[in-house]
Image (cartoon, coloured by chain):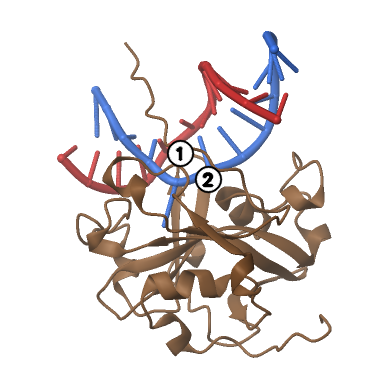
Chain colours: A brown, B red, C blue
Amino acid sequence: MIEGLDRTPLARDFFDRPVLEVAPDLLGRTLVRATPEGPIELRLTEVEAYAGEIDPGSHAFRGRTARNSVMFGPPGHAYVYFTYGMWHCLNLVCGPEGRASGVLLRAGDIQVGAELTRHRRNSARNDKELAKGPARLATALDVDRALNGTDVIAHPGAPLSVLHGTPPPRDQVRNGPRTGVGGDGATHPWRFWIDGDPTVSPYRAHVPRRRAI
DNA sequence: CCTATGATGATCT
DNA sequence: GATCATCATAGGT
């Protein structure tokens, strides 16, 4: 239990808003992962907004598929995808049902249960690196596709939930282009982070991979 | 600090 | 067959 933290899950209407409003408003909130060994609590420090079918950077840009179907469902659920053959990334669906928008949870500061994450994050040189990057965050929290579609606001004991935290003052929230997003989606400054926080991941521009000959 | 590159497989065209 | 909302590692500065 963290002093001063409200343990109430965020209401569904928190997520039932335009993704560009929800994304920065998630910074400073507490993401809770219930594991058999105990809870892991993470303060969100970096997120990216993906605006569904109007956003070339979104998995939903070309319409509904088997992979992205959760994005088209009701807000307040987890969209988990597998990428680069090795990693998982965790998003929260927001906006009205049918709009297919979501927020990628990119980084955070683990405040409770760091010891439960270290065996999965051996390469982390310090605790600030445990969840510094979206795949690192998912690995630290033991999130994989088994959690795709999970309701994150059901109750605090749910496998995954988002609780009220203390958002930073608005002048400490920065925004810029999304990491690793190319093409027409690269220009949208829809990455949001807490200025100066040591758990925020470094920005990387999209790099097209040279094809094998 | 930095940049380059291989790993690895689901997904979509 | 190409791409991919990435990471760990190696090696240069």
Q: Which residue is mark 2?
A: A87
Residue A128 visible in the picture: yes
Residue A180, picture quadrant: top left
The structure residue drawn at horizontal position 80% and vertical position 52%, both measured from the top left corner, is A127
Q: Residues within 10 Å of mark 2 (few under 14, many from 20)?
A: some
As displayed, is residue A159 above or below residue C4?
A: below
Residue A161, picture quadrant: bottom right
**Mark 2 chain:** A
Q: Nearer the viewer, residue A172 or A119?
A: A172
Can you say which quadrant of the picture contains the C terminus of chain A?
top left
Q: Which residue is mark 1?
A: A84
**Residue type (three-letter) at the residue carrying disc 2:** Trp
Find residue A208 and report its horizontal and vertical position in percent: 37, 29
Q: Is residue C8 left or right of residue A70?
A: right
Query: Mark 2 and mark 1 in contact (Cβ < 8 Å)?
Result: yes
Find residue A171 and report its horizontal and vertical position in percent: 61, 69
Q: Nearer the viewer, residue A152 or A35?
A: A152
